[in-house]
Image: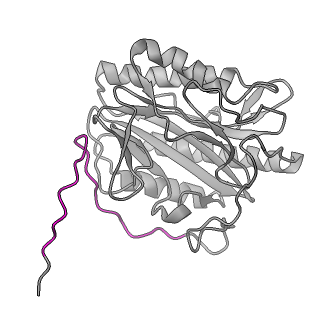
Amino acid sequence: GSSKSTTKAFPYTGSLRPGKLSPTRQVPDNILKPDYAKDGIPKLTQRGLPWDITTHTKEDIQRMRVAGRIAREVLDEAVRSIKIGITTDEIDRIVHEATISRNSYPSPLNYHKFPKSCCTSINEVICHGFPDSTILQDGDIINIDVTVYHDGVHGDCSETVLVGNVKDDVKDLVITTYNAWKAAIAICKPGVKYSEIGGVIEDIITPKGYTSVKEFCGHGIGRVFHANPNVLHYRNNQRHGVMAVGHTFTIEPMICLGSNKPVMWPDDWTATTSDGLACAQFEHTLLITETGVEELTGKIETSPKYSWEI
């Protein structure tokens, strides 16, 4: 007999809908792969208390500089490709090929079974959007999140790009998110509590009525993709440790025009705002040094300008 589906249509919060996924992109055998590449399950994890943070060796810090630089170059290629009419799958192809051409593995690919080589999060998507057949339209914003695995360590960065003519309120959200992110990076140095980051961000976004997502956070990174500390992007006094020389972590605020409450799509990855309004995000991998902080994924001479500066 036939079975009739009784599932109700999913209540999408904005105008975006899932597109079609292309076949899984392959990584050549000669490229060093993280432990989850085959079965989707990371084996190398960090145990311990929230304030137990890895201090990296000089050798691993040098590796992370290289991985960070590669992530930056790959993200730059993706950003240069953004135009009205491109599909997010085409962006993923560019990221995938740019990564493997640099003898690196695209970290998102098969991480907990994530199907693609980067995340593309448009408009109301907070994070973890799947690159697919979706076509970028005039007035969209898109965050591209790139992580590469090279010589045993990860480098992770993201940027929100304006597509064509973006409405003023959404453009202001993107610029304010950028400013809050840079202000948070600026306080980083040995002895600063990780819990101080969130307040700096909220001091800049709250006066404008914007909100910071609480369910997703920045993270330690190195040989492990996601490790201690948890970096919260809202005001808090949680015991997540103190910055020390040799720590590497991300700051990656997700700032919303309206509601900061996430709604998870049926794909179990794509998180969108509950009111369908826009969300912006920026991310760097950072290193605490004797004198302060180094942006391991910082822009380089050849990097494109931020889209609102053009």
Q: In the rendered image of this protein, does residue 187 appear above or below residue 83?
A: above
Which image quarter is the N terminus in?
bottom left
Q: Residue at x 78, y 44 (%)?
A: 52
Count of numbered labels shown in the rendering: 0
Q: Is residue 23 magenta?
A: yes
| Rendered location of residue 4, percent (x, y) | 12, 74
Q: Is residue 235 visible?
A: yes
Above-or-below relation of 12 to 259: below
53 with respect to 220 (left or right)? right
- Residue 92 drawn at (x, y percent): 44, 55
Q: Nearer the viewer, residue 190 or 119?
A: 190
**Residue 133 appears at what percent x and percent y?**
30, 56
* Residue shown at 41% from the left, 14% from the top: 208
Looking at the picture, the colour scheme in use is: one colour
Residue 308 seen in this snapshot: no
The C terminus, quarter of image: top left
Q: Is residue 208 above or below residue 193?
A: above
Q: Residue furthest bottom?
A: 1
Span colored in magenta = 4-26
Lateral position of residue 91 relative to residue 301, left or right: left
Q: Position of residue 272 (x, y in %)?
A: 35, 42
Which of the two residues, 300 or 288, is positioned nearer the viewer here? 288
| Residue nearest the observer in this picture, 270 or 115 | 270
Q: Say whether residue 296 is magenta.
A: no
Main SS class of the magenta portion in the image? loop
Q: Residue at x 22, y 53 (%)?
A: 10
